[in-house]
Amino acid sequence: MRPGHLRLWHFLKLSLRRTSVSSGAHASTWVPAASANLVAQRSAVAASQATSALFQGTLCFAAAAVIGSTVMASWQPAHCIEDKLEPGVLKELAHDLSSSLNADRERAVSMLSSLTPFLEHHEAMLHAGVLPCLMQAVEDQEMVPQVRVLALCCAADLMKDSAAHEETVHSQSFLSVVMAALQSEGTWGEGPEDGLMARSHASRLLSELCSDGRCHPILIREGAAGLLVKRGAELAVEGEKAGSRYTSLSAAPANMNTILSVEEERYLSASLFGLASSTSGRDALATAEAKIIKGMALWTHSRDPILQRYGAIGRIAEMGGEAALTIGKHGAAIALTSMLTQKQEGQSDGVHRGVQRCAIRSMHACSRCPPLRQGLLASQANLALQELLSQPGLSQELQQMVQATLQQLA
């Protein structure tokens, strides 16, 4: 499920909880007194509580989703002036995350979740101290479970900004909670879907940290890298056995558990791809059990273009040794040819080009490893590469890489 859909689900659950809160003093305790948008903010709160009252009947989930998304959309303009957020508003929302009142915490995290997806807001939010408050909310096991899950979602959003990485990766207590969430440890909600959401958000957050090589030594030292390797191997093998791979999220069954599992596996593959970009990360992969390398090889056979793209096969091939032999044993080199030539049904042109670029780079690495080179020749990769050279639109960098690969295969 996409982060926006998860946000809506969290929002609806929090709205249902709010029906027990009066519309008196509690309704406005989170509103900053100095805000120029005070009236608009209070109107938004009143709207959210009116919506909550509707949820108590037999209103179906689809109708609730429409109403919930409308209210969420109405919140953001109340906190923006010419697309810039007021520091006072952000600081008040951050402060309310640690309020003694559930209503304040729920409204604060719901408001923040409507802002964190927008990259242009991140600098202001980080400057206002929103991130440490979100981290504290995630760590607080006495917090309402849905608030913790949504706070984790917001923290994962903020990881898109590399400025947030250092503060996050140096918080041992926060990393421990995120790692526990990835293992489904701890109480995250009233139903199983809350634990799955926490796991999906945790894997997304870690994938952003893994994209930053500066974080790798700490992630390895704290055990996060080993956990990602272990969980990635489990999902790769489970997904292959169950056949639960889809060309896109829209092709997956409309089942929350299935969609969350698909997203978790995608984020884990991105995490391992990021780890493989540094020497310390590659060493961590090389010393891991062979089954993770097998799992990464299986991802190249997947119908899921995201798993194919982030399988890190090229980076593993460059490592040589047993790691390269393992991916060769499981047919990764042969699968690269189909990645290059076969466009999956329903796959957009942009995604297909991304998969092709990954295949070209991986072929270039594999062509320098004798066992993998034999696999490429067996799959007639040379013919596929020659055909690709005759097509327009290939960048100069990729043209040079294709030509170098053909020379290796000659």
Image: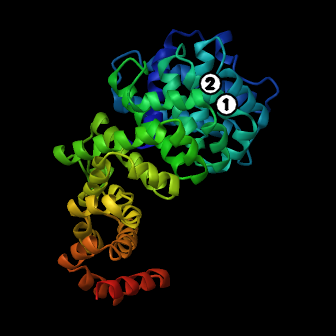
Labels 1 & 2 near each other (Cβ < 8 A): yes
Rendered position, 262 above or below 128: below
For the N terminus, the quadrant is top left
What amino acid type is highlighted by mark number 1?
A: Pro
Residue at image point 37% right, 46% down: 288
Could you say which quadrant of the image residue 74 lies in? top right
Residue lying furthest right: 34
Residue at image point 53% right, 53% down: 211
Q: Residues within 10 Å of mark 1 (few under 14, many from 20)?
A: some
Relative side of 63 to 238, left or right: right
The residue wearing badge 2 is 136
What amino acid type is highlighted by mark number 2?
A: Gln
Instruction: Assign a secondary structure to mark 1.
Output: helix
Residue 138, percent from left and from top: 55, 25
Residue 287, percent from left and from top: 39, 48
Asked if one can make out residue 54 in the rendered structure from this viewpoint, the answer is yes
Could you say which quadrant of the image residue 303 lies in? bottom left
Relative side of 374 to 49, left or right: left
The residue wearing badge 1 is 132
Report how far apart the C-alphas of labels 1 and 2 lie in the structure. 6 Å
Could you say which quadrant of the image residue 312 lies in? bottom left
Residue 137, percent from left and from top: 59, 23
Residue at image point 67% right, 30% down: 132
Instruction: Assign a secondary structure to mark 2.
Output: helix
Rendered position, 114 above or below 149: below
Residue 395, percent from left and from top: 47, 82
Asked if one can make out residue 117 in the rendered structure from this viewpoint, the answer is no
Residue at image point 64% right, 36% down: 170
Q: Nearer the viewer, residue 344 or 22?
A: 344
